[in-house]
């Protein structure tokens, strides 16, 4: 199959199309990643519709109704996604006919979704070329610099992607996915946010309609306990800081949508806190670490499956024996959920207790955008890109089924 070289003026657009947020930007400006919410939002009071990053300019953020293009981690609502992509490409100033697209997709994406994706990319938007792969494949690129500080990518890498819908554990050997070792835990950021909403609504304030606010509370206040039983005992009788002076308790100042849009931890609000005269406080104590514990014990929320640490061990044991020690030494923890404080240390401790080999887990500075940065690294590998990408002319010549088969070869 021949490849038509890219014109000198053609730019490579990296689009990490996550179910919670789109991480996007051009490969030649690897520090200018844009994070755009992958949802269409309607406000409860004014009924106004916001698409993607338009929500950033709204001050009416109470009781938002979200419509996501994704269900259970897979892209199924194309009418919503097209509206968000239209907005995204406008923000980026993208001209598809002069752009090469590197697009991420879920692990083990359905063939029907891949077919629809290719048709929309080439026929609806008419991109000049496209390469499509799971976000975990993007995350593998440039892993040598992440794990060792410099040098080539390791032969074996285990990617743990704590995403919005699910958490995936995906082993790679020579940049090829070991499909037999892929494992999924049905706990991600969305479930943790919903779990937090239910918990605080039962104990304190009714926050069931406040997804936007509670997601901010989760990101700023929650952490992964290193000793759950000890921390639980330490917080006995604690409700925020209203009872005693427990070091794990805090109070979150809910937003008034005038001085603050998301709220803040009490005594850490800066100028906004000084301006707010009537503060509504949400006390938090054991909720801070009990919510993320679902990553290690999904049975806490009614899911009959093992936790993230068990999925890692199962994934490694499903790989050839001579690769297992190297995989355990080269674990890369990415995704929006990887930013939870204490997750790296807890996961490493739990996995180490179950295996005879040395476990080493590395987390990027910004794990939510690491897959996008890996896509930038892939786009800069001219030899690989020339083999991987399909041009629009080739798509029309080959047909959808052959294009899908071609992309699956590079996973």
Image (tube, grey):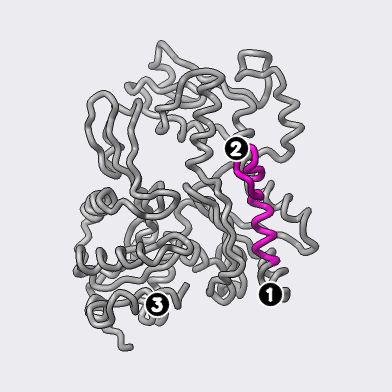
Residue 149 versus residue 70 in the image, above or below: below
**Can residue 314 be seen here?**
yes
- Mark found first going from the N terminus, 1 or 3: 1
Q: Observer-nearest residue: 317 or 36?
A: 317
- The residue where tag 1 is placed is 320
Residue 269 x %, y %: 46, 25
> In the figure, is residue 289 to the left or right of 40?
right
Q: Observer-nearest residue: 74 or 290?
A: 74
Q: Which residue is painted at 58% across and 71% down in the image?
A: 178
Asked if labels 2 and 3 touch by Cβ distance under 8 angstroms, the answer is no
> In the figure, is residue 102 to the left or right of 152?
left
Asked if labels 1 and 2 touch by Cβ distance under 8 angstroms, the answer is no
Magenta stretch, residue numbers: 296-317
SS category of the residue bearing label 1: loop
**Can residue 91 be seen here?**
no
Bin the neighbour count of mark 1 within 10 Å (Cα to Cα): few under 14, some 14-19, many 20 and up: few
Camera-nearest label, 1 or 3: 3
Query: Which residue in the rendered view is the most extreme toward the bottom?
Result: 2
Q: Which residue is painted at 36% across and 28% down in the image?
A: 261
Q: Which mark is residue 405?
A: 3
Asked if labels 3 and 1 touch by Cβ distance under 8 angstroms, the answer is no
- The residue where tag 2 is placed is 301
The CA span between labels 3 and 2 is: 38 Å
SS category of the residue bearing label 3: helix
The CA span between labels 2 and 1 is: 33 Å
Residue 50 versus residue 255 in the image, above or below: below
Q: Which residue is painted at 70% across and 17% down in the image?
A: 237
Residue 343 x %, y %: 63, 46
Bin the neighbour count of mark 2 within 10 Å (Cα to Cα): few under 14, some 14-19, many 20 and up: some
Magenta segment includes 262: no
- Mark found first going from the N terminus, 2 or 1: 2
């Amino acid at each position: 199959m021949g490849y038509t070289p890219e014109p000198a003026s053609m730019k490579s657009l990296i689009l990490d199309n996550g179910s919670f947020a789109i991480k996007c930007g051009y490969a030649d400006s690897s520090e200018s990643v844009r994070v755009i919410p992958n949802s269409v939002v309607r406000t409860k009071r004014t009924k106004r519709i916001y698409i993607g990053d338009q929500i950033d300019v709204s001050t009416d953020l109470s009781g938002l109704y979200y419509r996501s293009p994704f269900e259970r981690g897979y892209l199924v609502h194309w009418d919503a996604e097209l509206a968000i992509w239209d907005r995204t490409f406008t923000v980026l100033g993208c001209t598809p006919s002069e752009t090469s697209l590197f697009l991420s997709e879920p692990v083990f994406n359905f063939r029907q979704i891949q077919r629809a994706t290719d048709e929309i990319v080439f026929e609806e938007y008419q991109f000049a070329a496209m390469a499509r792969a799971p976000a975990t494949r993007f995350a593998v690129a440039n892993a040598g610099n992440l794990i060792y500080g410099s040098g080539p990518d390791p032969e074996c890498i285990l990617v743990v992607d704590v995403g919005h819908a699910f958490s995936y554990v995906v082993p790679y050997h020579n940049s090829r996915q070991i499909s037999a070792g892929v494992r999924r835990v049905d706990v991600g950021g969305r479930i943790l946010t919903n779990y937090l909403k239910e918990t605080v609504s039962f104990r304190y304030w009714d926050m069931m309609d406040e997804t936007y606010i509670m997601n901010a509370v989760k990101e700023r206040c929650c952490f992964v306990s290193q000793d759950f039983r000890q921390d639980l005992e330490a917080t006995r009788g604690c409700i925020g800081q209203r009872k005693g002076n427990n070091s794990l308790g805090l109070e979150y100042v809910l937003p008034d949508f005038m001085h603050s849009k998301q709220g803040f931890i009490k005594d850490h609000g800066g100028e906004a806190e000084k301006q707010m005269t009537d503060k509504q406080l949400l006390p938090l104590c054991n909720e801070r670490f009990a919510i993320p514990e679902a990553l290690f014990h999904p049975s806490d929320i009614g899911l009959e499956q093992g936790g993230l640490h068990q999925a890692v061990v199962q994934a490694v044991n499903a790989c050839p024996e001579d690769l297992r020690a190297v995989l355990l030494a080269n674990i890369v923890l990415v995704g929006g959920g990887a930013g939870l404080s204490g997750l790296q240390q807890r996961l490493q401790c739990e996995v180490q207790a179950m295996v005879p080999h040395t476990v080493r887990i590395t987390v990027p500075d910004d794990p939510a955008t690491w897959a996008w940065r890996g896509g930038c690294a892939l786009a800069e590998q001219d030899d690989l890109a020339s083999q991987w990408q399909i041009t629009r002319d080739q798509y029309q010549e080959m047909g959808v089924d052959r294009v899908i088969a071609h992309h699956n070869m590079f996973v």
